[in-house]
Amino acid sequence: MALNEFELIRRYFRFSEPVIGSGDLGVGDDCALLAVPAGEQLAVSTDTLVSGVHFPADAPPDLLAKRALRVNLSDLAAMGAEPLGFQLALTLPEVDTTWLAAFSAALGEDALLFQCPLLGGDTTRGGLALTLTVLGRVPRNGALLRSRAQAGDLIYVTGTLGDSAAGLYCLETGQDNDYLLNRYWQPSPRLDAGKALRGLASAALDISDGLLQDVSHIASASGLSAVIDRQAVPLSGAIRAIAAPEQGYSWALSGGDDYELCFTLPPEQSAAMEQRLAAIGVRVSAIGRMIPYTGTRVQCLDEQGAVVTVETPGYDHFRC
Amino acid sequence: MALNEFELIRRYFRFSEPVIGSGDLGVGDDCALLAVPAGEQLAVSTDTLVSGVHFPADAPPDLLAKRALRVNLSDLAAMGAEPLGFQLALTLPEVDTTWLAAFSAALGEDALLFQCPLLGGDTTRGGLALTLTVLGRVPRNGALLRSRAQAGDLIYVTGTLGDSAAGLYCLETGQDNDYLLNRYWQPSPRLDAGKALRGLASAALDISDGLLQDVSHIASASGLSAVIDRQAVPLSGAIRAIAAPEQGYSWALSGGDDYELCFTLPPEQSAAMEQRLAAIGVRVSAIGRMIPYTGTRVQCLDEQGAVVTVETPGYDHFRC
């Protein structure tokens, strides 16, 4: 079917026009225009998802659309930022109007749900890939950085870990498990939690590469080491139902794509933080502590205090 | 060579740190952070370049890097915006350190030249492709839109047209022609001209898809028609030296990738505009006028006033 780039954009990618603020400008000019409120900073993050690398080539377009936006929103959550909008660069092997209609409808739903309008982007021909750039706002000097953890801080995570890796395992082995598959396809960006942690957490990030690898980023950026107590790492009932604890912990420690937040804070802030997160219905678990640098960025200890060796330290998008 | 994503970013993509403003944050956290001055709006644009579609698969990495950034900066120029920084999503089939070193050095040079620091991005494995998202600043209500042209406005272009298409022709036919090849590989984003046109031009865009197609975007967004006088379209001496006028005009009218600005303005503003652009050394040519909608968005007339039929009306990234 002949459908040129302009028609394609007009037909499938103007769903956000009603959401865009007055004075702002979305799809259709050389640039989108956006106001950033006074006293706030812009937060920007970009993620690329490549077919066959980051998702199966036959991924359902609606799930793919939601996953792509949510994965990017998770980076805003990790900074304590709120969404302003996003850019979409979509590379397609062909114009498949059924695929595009499903993709666009799902993307529009989530753009509305997260109040994150599509501002603009580019459509090109090539192997299926998506690059999203999300823009957010955060009070000046209020962003949650990776580099501000202090020795003595506790390490927390939101939600449960390993579900996404377990979901991918279910997908690859053809197991029907709605909860885990949903955790893989439709992670919940922890935007409310990130916002609630402003002024309390000393450092934060989202868990995209696996807990141990991501904690090592906080440790490294803050010039410290981290100790994780394996038995404190929260596993879902769904994982416990399908796998032995060893497998569950392996998914939780080194599986990527959980998109929960990992953050540090001084022990004296714990009560205030737990109260705030309980108020928005987000579960948190203390899983370890930051210590002065020992020569190793992250150590994980088991129930007996023995060091756990993890074979695959997180997902590396690029080892060749 | 084993080089993981984090080492790759550390080694090749931290060149902009010295350029980033104080209080801002570049590569290395979940998001980059950026201040947008009070009274200004953020301008955002995204472009993807796919190997084999938008550039030859064996494109020299330094030229590719510069072209990718300049093509994106041209969108800021078209809005009258100034660069704040950019995000880079780089998809690579393998880690080739020679390629990366050349790409990164050239990108760093242009980031400095255009004062547009690399803020962050993503590196992934897959077919070679680049998606850049540039961020810029423009005074609130000062951006040059496509939609504000008026009947009676003159149509102008900066520089000369068709050089990039002629350069691509030279590339594909193995002709050595430094000037034209350079116009293809290293277009000059007209940032100074865009800024100078604020408050004068009624509408503007950059010529990326071919003059006639791009003019039709202004006509369509403004609810008007446009008439182009072919003999007024500026051709370079380099084109006249290698091609008959018919071929030259064909490149100028429908060749893409010139990245000159096309803009409209009321005739009474012409003198002021010409003076401003002369002061910054930018050539401009009046090539036509906007008229009430006739049923056809763009008509191109030859020396005798006869309608010129153009076979390929501009580059379409997506006809399948």
Image: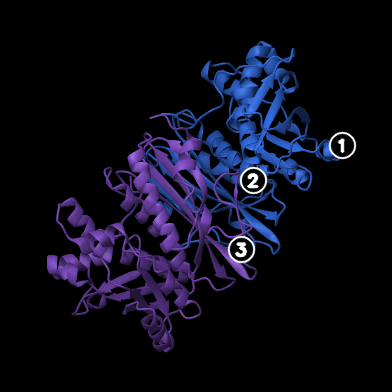
Chain colours: A purple, B blue
The circle on residue B4 is none
Residue A204 shown left or right of residue B83 in the figure: left
The answer to whether mark 1 and mark 2 are in CB contact below 8 A is no
Q: Which residue is mark 2?
A: B76
Residue at 30% of width from left, 60% of height from top? A256
Element under disc 1: helix
Q: Nearer the viewer, mark 1 or mark 2?
A: 1
Give the mark nearest the N terminus, 1 or 2.
Answer: 2
The answer as to whether the residues below labels 1 and 3 share one chain is no
Residue at 16% of width from left, 65% of height from top? A247
Q: How crowded is the residue under tag 2: few (<14 C-alpha within 10 Å), some, or many (20+)?
A: many
- Residue A247 to residue B306: above or below: below
Residue at 48% of width from left, 70% of height from top? A80
Could you tell me the amino acid type at mark 2? Answer: Leu
The circle on residue A36 is 3
Residue A54 placement (x, y as % from top left): 32, 49
Residue at 21% of width from left, 68% of height from top? A249
Residue A67 placement (x, y as % from top left): 35, 55
Quadrant containing the C terminus of chain A is top left
Residue B274 placement (x, y as % from top left): 83, 36
